[in-house]
Image (cartoon, grey):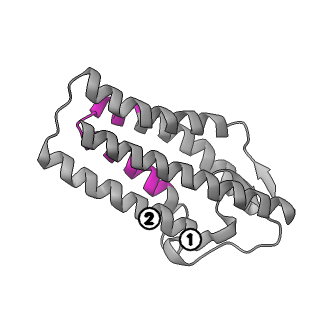
Amino acid sequence: MSAYLVLVGLVVLERLAELVVARRNLAWARARGGVEYGRGHYPFIVLLHVALLAAAPAEVWALHRPFLPALGWPMLALVVLAQGLRWWCIRTLGHQWNTRVVVVPGLPLVDRGPYRWFRHPNYVAVVAEGIALPLVHTAWVTAVAFTAVNAALLAVRIRVEERALAL
């Protein structure tokens, strides 16, 4: 359990680093006329991600979920790969990356890096992490609940992004 708490703690630190980058990029975008879309759903996304990071270790502790190596090690590898994909997206988008939907008028769509193959590769990382992080320590209730709620939120989020990018 203590190793799992360290893992979740590292993911929390990663998320805090994302927020620092996002805040800096938001200021950059606003200084260039960036417009934010979909503010209404953003607090729910934040709440869901905080809930994932709290619920997974809580489920492990409260329900005495074991670490099963045949499941845990592949899921740990998937968590690490998801972080790599996430930071590849952040690096590829540069100042255009944000946790919010912000569009700077006149900037072209990015079509390099992982965006060559996927329209929304960061969400591939989000989905993978949301399943894998809880399953590292068999917190399957958290994995299922996060995935279901995340699917609904991502449907909204992707519609908002597609509309914003089409303007």
Q: From the image, which quarter does the C terminus lie in?
A: bottom right
Front in this rendered view, residue 143 or 117: 143
* Residue at image coords 62%, 70%: 93
User: Which residue was labeled with disc 2?
Assistant: 85
Range of residues picked out in magenta:
123-145
**How many marks are shown on the rendered structure?**
2
x, y percent for residue 140: 28, 33
Pointer 2 or 1: first along the chain: 2
Q: Secondary structure at mark 2?
A: helix
* Label 1 CA crowd tier, 10 Å (few <14, some 14–19, many 20+): few
Front in this rendered view, residue 156 or 140: 140
Q: Is residue 43 among what the camera can see?
A: yes
Labelled disc at residue 91: 1
* Residue at image coords 33%, 44%: 6
* Residue at image coords 69%, 68%: 95
Tell me where residue 53 sits by quadrant: top left
Q: From the image, which quarter does the N terminus lie in?
A: top left
Amino acid of disc 2: Leu
